[in-house]
Amino acid sequence: MTLIANVPKIWYQQYFSMDYLLKYGYFDFKYSSRKSNEEYILSNLVYKEIFNTEDISKIYLDLKSLHNIKFNSTKVTYPIELSIFKNDDERRKIKFPNIYSYICLCEHLNQEQDIYMDILYKSKQSLSNRFYSETFLNGKIKRTKNRFGKRKIFKTDIQHFYPSIYTHSIPWILVGKNEAKKNKNKKNLYYNKLDSLIQRCQIGETHGIPTGSFATKLIAEIYMCKLDEKLSDHKYVRYVDDFEIPYNDVVKKDSFYKSLSKELSNLNLKIKVEKNEIDRFPFQDGNNSAFFFDYFTNIATKVSDQRKRIYNFIEESINKEREGHKGSIKLMFRALIDSVKNGVLKEETFDKYLHSNLFNLVLMQPILAVLYIEFLEHFKNNDEAILSIKSNKEEIQSSINNYIELSYSQELFSLLSIFHYLELYELLPKEILKKIIEQMDDLSAILAFEALLVNEDNIDYDLFENSETKLLNSLSWEDEFWFFKYHVIFKINLNKKKKIYKEFREFLFLKYGNGSMNKGAFMNKKNLVNIESPINRFFQSKNSHQDIGKFFDVLLDNKISFIKI
């Protein structure tokens, strides 16, 4: 294989580095080295100052050299699973792998990066193969160039792309189906390793890949770039799994459609027929970002005038979203953030009612929560925002109960993230927080646990019993709800002088002591390893694969956290 030249290779090297994959990749924080200011780091799902993997990225080299962690376990692990809003009629599932399995996958991508970078670079059809290094303008130029002289565009995409990828089809696309099947038992071949590593990230499942992390995005793009090679006779462009081919002659469109259908069928994938669309010149394109970012140019300085202008801006942005310009409300928040940050819009312009208007948009579209928090970052104080939220207390609590009943992860942890950021816990009664811990996803449960710890009176037998109920089937670090479990054990063992550590020891003795020995003997480490509590770190490590147990022990000993407290 002829590897790519050094200059284009720079486009990809950062994305295959262990530092990037660990620091930014786990929660897929969107970061480009062209932007030196890390204020630009943003994830669609989680806020960088609440959940992040910065600590583990700092200790990674020591895990290998000082602590001799091998990252060679073949044990399958449970991912974090979240129910995410897609549209009013459909939801999708996001999966973040167990952090141990994720590092194993990242090491593979790092070690085989030359092969994968070559695949990415070779695709001339992809608009997504440069990830966050590509500018919006460059993408627009490529689309326009490909459409030159054509009056029609055919658009289509793959049905349920990420959940439908058969992991065994990854070797098929990488080296060809016949070659892959012939060598399927040769586990050391890079493509078989990748297949196996993905399965380990999702309890051995072969259907779908664990959507959520940047590593998965990287694998999906590699997969699609190999598909581009098979369709190289057709002049189309592609963004992830969205295809568009411009044409004048319907024969060219039909030929592309037939070829795409055939190649997808070979991979056990299919076209989402109901999304097929023909656009005619003048084409309906995406948003003009200038509308949003120039909206407040030369705006008056009078607060009342600014307020009126902002209300109009919100209304126009919502109308654009309704008309089919996806992302209009996101761009609206981005423009507001820039205008407040640069002093174009005055802080006092945003009163309780305007804040309430913006917060309501978050309730409608939970994916806006991260942008909303970033917006609040640029205020000297958030009193008006807090007042606006408190004034809607009854509706918010009703929404929370509804999210729990429907198992709506994203809506719930988005709200809890905002409350955590604002230190606004009075809207969260103890019984609701306990219900969240027992019934909801890892992220929501962690934020509920943190909310309970704000009042030390909540640190009691019931708190630990509540946590154990959630973790009833989580008896090793490979098991479900590992992320929540790690945080609870981390908080318990962070400081032995704290009430939570002392109360936990009392809880263990009362629940598991059975009066068979005195407290001192019971608390001896040799005895504790046999106490089958899911929040007992010694039992967890003993019950896990050796390398995985050692890995989590080192994280706990080094006070590695996944949440900024």
Image (spheres, rainbow, N blue to C red):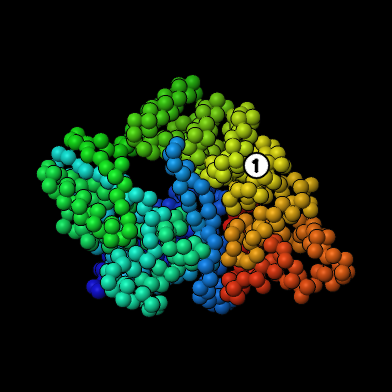
Q: In the picture, residue 490 is in which quadrant? A: bottom right
Q: Bin the neighbour count of mark 1 within 10 Å (Cα to Cα): few under 14, some 14-19, many 20 and up.
A: few
Left-right relation of 63 to 454: left
Image location of residue 17, percent across then percent down: 42, 66
Which of the pair 420/95 is nearer the observer?
A: 95
Q: In the picture, residue 351 is in which quadrant? A: top right
Left-right relation of 131 to 253: right
Helix, strand or loop status at disc 1: loop
Specify whether residue 19 is in view: no
Q: Residue at x 28, y 61 (%)?
A: 266
Q: Residue at x 55, y 29 (%)?
A: 356
Q: Looking at the picture, which amino acid does disc 1 mark? A: Glu
Left-right relation of 120 to 417: left
Which of the pair 343/118 is nearer the observer?
A: 118
Please tell me whether residue 214 is drawn above or below residue 427 in the rendered image. below
Image location of residue 235, percent across then percent down: 17, 52
Left-right relation of 284 to 312: left
Q: How many marks?
A: 1
Q: In the picture, residue 288 is in which quadrant? A: top left
Q: Residue at x 55, y 25 (%)?
A: 353
Which of the pair 456/160 is nearer the observer?
A: 160
Q: Residue at x 50, y 43 (%)?
A: 370
Please tell me whether residue 456 is drawn above or below residue 334 in the rendered image. below
Image location of residue 417, percent across then percent down: 58, 44
Quadrant in which the N terminus appears: bottom left
Specify whether residue 439 is in view: yes
Image location of residue 272, percent across then percent down: 31, 47
Please name the residue that numbered disc 1 is placed on: 423
